[in-house]
Amino acid sequence: MKLLVAIVFTIVLFSAINAQAQEDVTVRAKITEIDTQIRGRQSYAMATVNYTTKEGKQYTSKVRILSIPFVGTSKKVGDSIVITYNTENPYLVKSKSEGFLQTYGIYILIFLGIIAAWYNFKKRKPKAV
């Protein structure tokens, strides 16, 4: 029963995320500046990008791009990247290089945790009386 509730909960979360994605538009943007920061074991890169919306208006915004610890990013100033912006607020942008795991990673981990807990619960032997 708990597994069924967890599966329904996961489906509801994914459908809510997909509803948000329908308001986003994908365009190409040009990188004008890259700021890489390293904090402990984590590193991340923010790129300042210029892009034109489907309505023809130009915007400048910052977007997170993929950065590998100890290596950095494969992007450089002048490169073109694919971004998505929110139609209601074009300053809200996401990079496609953020990828699947950054978008859905927490939901995948929750789902895997539920599966692992269920497996351990089923595997547990009843105590002898």
Image (tube, rainbow, N blue to C red):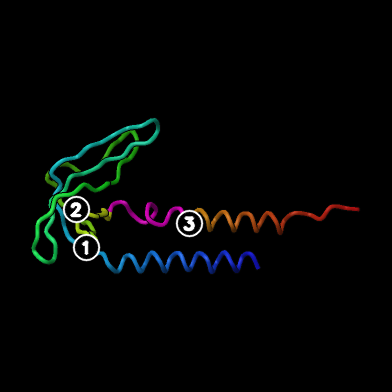
Quick one: quadrant of the N terminus? bottom right
Residue that mark 3 sits on:
108
Which numbered disc, 1 or 2, marks the residue closer to the eye? 1
Per the rendering, the mark at residue 57 is: none
For mark 2, give the secondary structure: strand
Q: Which residues are magenta?
A: 97-108
Per the rendering, the mark at residue 26 is: 1
Amino acid type of the residue tagged 1 in the rendering: Thr
The stretch drawn in magenta includes residue 66: no
Q: CA distance from mark 1 to mark 2?
A: 10 Å
Q: Residue furthest right?
A: 129
* Image quadrant assignment for residue 40: top left
Residue 16 rendering spot, x and y as whole percentages:
40, 66
Amino acid type of the residue tagged 2 in the rendering: Ile
Residue 93 rendering spot, x and y as whole percentages:
24, 54
Residue 66 rendering spot, x and y as whole percentages:
29, 46
Q: From what the image shows, is residue 87 above or below residue 62? A: below
Report if the CB atoms under discs 3 and 1 are less than 8 Å apart: no
Give the residue displayed 15% in from the left and 46% down from the top.
31
Q: CA distance from mark 3 to mark 2?
A: 26 Å
For mark 1, give the secondary structure: strand
Report if the CB atoms under discs 1 and 2 are less than 8 Å apart: no
* Image quadrant assignment for residue 14: bottom left
Per the rendering, the mark at residue 81 is: 2
Amino acid type of the residue tagged 3 in the rendering: Ile
